[in-house]
Every structure is written in structure tokens, then in C-alpha cells.
Image (spheres, rainbow, N blue to C red):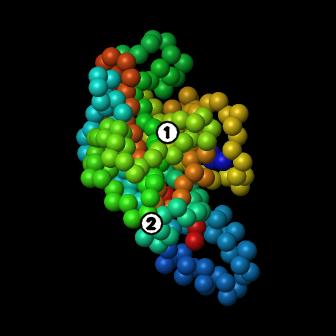
Amino acid sequence: MEASSSHSRESSEEGLKQSIPYSEEEVQATKCVLYAFLPLELVDGILDLAMYWPSIVSHETRLVEATSEGSDNLIYFMAPPFLEGRLGVGAPVNVKMIKFSLTSCDQGWGGEPNMPGPYHGSWSWFETAIFRATGFGFNWPEESNSAGVECYQVLQKGGIEQVPNPVNSKKVWTLQRNIRAYSMTAIHEVVWIKSSSHKIETSVRDEEDLDTGSGLGVGFINSLVSGDRIAIIAKARYPGWINHVYDAKIEVFYSL
């Protein structure tokens, strides 16, 4: 499996406060110091074990509501093109980890009784997608920088494609379900870490862990190239279901 997933609800807010993004300059300076004492291959291994990677943080705070009546496929926000300024468009990138943080809740009622866990039978949730420009020198439409727009409103402008999920040929990955019938806002953190194996297990059937409501992210990290934009999509299905979204953050960690 290409990515592993971890989940936290109660402690995720504290974890975000303690998350200190490192810049490329800081990581490169640390490498230069270590190179004076250690071989190149050991330095890279040490930094990977310490998860000492530069990161890019994208953050949106505003109320958006995805409902089952018409607006059930809303882009909450789309991160800027990844490393486009340094690498251009379409270059390989060595992404190590992606951390998503979501603050949201559903309508606070409904769902089937006697479900085995708080995420089973939840029909308001999040997906993530990779949007990619199909040509060089592309100017992204204004809709791609707006919160609460439908996916088709971005795609219909032309020159943009959604990258397929290599496991199931869908163009999205399941990210996180809301706690079922719970009106209090909750913070969910989903972390996908690149594994040492680049093999995609196409036999994987489950897209998510129903005990935590988190998606597994198989194939997501290896699908990214420079210039891609990661989107968080708010979803709801069936009458009465609503996804109230208040805040979201994407942090992409990569190596130089």
C-alpha cells in the first residue's frame, strides 16, 4: 500500500498548534551542517526518520454548507499549484506526507439507529481530488480560488482535468466522514504517509476505515506532480443531510 493513514479527533487541534512548518532554507542549512560529519545517504535517512521536511500549508476559514438538495459536491477550497514556481508544471515531486485538518459537523439528527460506530451510516463527508492543468502557461479560472463552488464550475472552463484514483478509476479519494447525527463541530485530522513501497495495491477494496471515518489515501501521494492543486470537496447525500464546514487545512511535506 502506497500510503498509510492515521486519525485523530480529540487531540488534532493541539497537534496543529504544535506543527511548525520548516522552510526549504532551514532544511538545506541543516543538511549542510550534517554533511560535514556524515555521509550523504545517512543524512537523508536521519532527516526522514525525524520527519524534518519542508512543508507548504494552505488554509481556509469560512462557513460552507453542502446539502443533499442540489449543492452536494462543493469544493471547499483548492490549494495553490504545488511547487510550480520552483519546478514548473508536471515535474516529479517527492512528497513524504500530507496532513488534512477539517472542522465540521452534520445536521445533528437522522441516520439509522443501532449503528456499530459513530461514523457508520454517516452521509455527510469529505473527498479530496487532484486538479491538473493540461497545458503550460495555464491561467487558473477565478472559480478555482473561490470557496463553495461546484466541481463542474471549475472543470467547464477547460484546460483542467481531475487526476484518476489508480485504485478504482474514480477521480476522488475518500477523506473523512462526519460524526453521524452530531451537531457539535469536531476537528478531524487525517494523515497520509508515503510508504517505502511504490506499488499500488489495486486489489484494495476499502477506501476508508469505518471505525475512524478516515480515508486510506492509497495512490494519492504518488499521483502528485508539480503544479497540481489539491482540493477538499464537501459532500452530502440523501434528504436532510448537511455538511457544515467551518475550517480546513492542507499541509504537504516534501523532501528536497
What amino acid is at disc 2?
Glu
| Disc 2 packing (10 Å; few <14; some 14–19; many ≥20) | some
Q: Residue furthest bottom?
A: 36
Q: Please state which of residues 15 and 121 is positioned toward the viewer in this rendering.
A: 121
What amino acid is at disc 1?
Val
| Quarter where residue 67 is shown | top left
Q: Position of residue 136 (x, y in %)?
A: 44, 63
Q: Please state which of residues 202 and 246 is positioned toward the viewer in this rendering.
A: 202
Q: Which residue is mark 1?
A: 172
Give above or below for 99 relative to 67. below
State the residue at coordinates (61%, 79%): 31
Q: Position of residue 56 (x, y in %)?
A: 44, 62
Q: Which residue is mark 2?
A: 84
- The total of numbered circles placed on residues is 2
Point out the tag, 2 or 1, that comes first from the N-terminus: 2
How far apart, in angstroms, are the residues tagged by discs 2 and 1?
Answer: 22 Å
